[in-house]
Amino acid sequence: MEKIYRINEVLTMLGVHRSTIYRYMAHGCFPRPIRLMPESSSSAIGWTESSLEKWLQSREGSSHD
């Protein structure tokens, strides 16, 4: 089973603010999170390890903030 990272883990991993993650998503340059409990009304979200690794690899050598 693939690891799921919650928002606080992603913020720590990347060293950015929450607003930066949402700005990246709005510009289409950061993976969208998945809903952790799709059948419930919970708003819990997270990112798969593979989606974050792919994003990090795409940024290697890039000068984006």
Image (cartoon, rainbow, N blue to C red):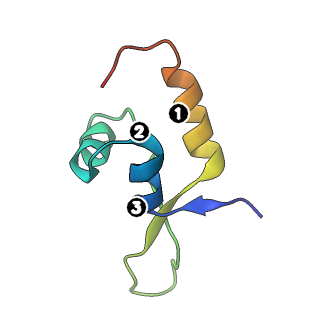
Residue under the point 58% across and 44% down: 51
Above or below for 4 versus 60: below
Using the image as rendered, state which of residue 9 and residue 53 is in the foreground: 9
Above or below for 53 versus 37: above
The label on residue 55 is: 1
Q: Amino acid at mark 3?
A: Asn
Q: Quadrant of the C terminus?
A: top left
Which secondary structure lies at badge 2?
loop
Mark-to-mark CA distance, 2 and 1 = 7 Å
Asked which quadrant contains residue 58, the reply is top right
Label located before the other in sequence (3 or 2): 3
Q: Nearer the viewer, mark 1 or mark 3?
A: 3
Above or below for 62 versus 20: above
Mark 1 is surrounded, within 10 Å at the Cα level, by few (under 14), some (14 to 19) or many (20 or more) other residues, namely some
Q: Quadrant of the N terminus?
A: bottom right
Mark-to-mark CA distance, 3 and 2 = 16 Å
Asked whether the beta carbons under mark 1 and mark 3 sit within 8 Å of each other, the answer is no
Q: Pinpoint residue 38: horizontal percent, then vertical percent.
A: 51, 77
Which secondary structure lies at badge 1?
helix
Label located before the other in sequence (1 or 3): 3
Q: Which residue is mark 2?
A: 30
Mark 2 is surrounded, within 10 Å at the Cα level, by few (under 14), some (14 to 19) or many (20 or more) other residues, namely some
Q: Nearer the viewer, mark 3 or mark 2?
A: 3
Asked whether the beta carbons under mark 2 and mark 1 sit within 8 Å of each other, the answer is yes
Label located before the other in sequence (2 or 1): 2
Above or below for 64 versus 18: above
Which secondary structure lies at badge 3?
helix
Q: Pinpoint residue 32: horizontal percent, then vertical percent.
A: 43, 50
Mark-to-mark CA distance, 1 and 3 = 17 Å
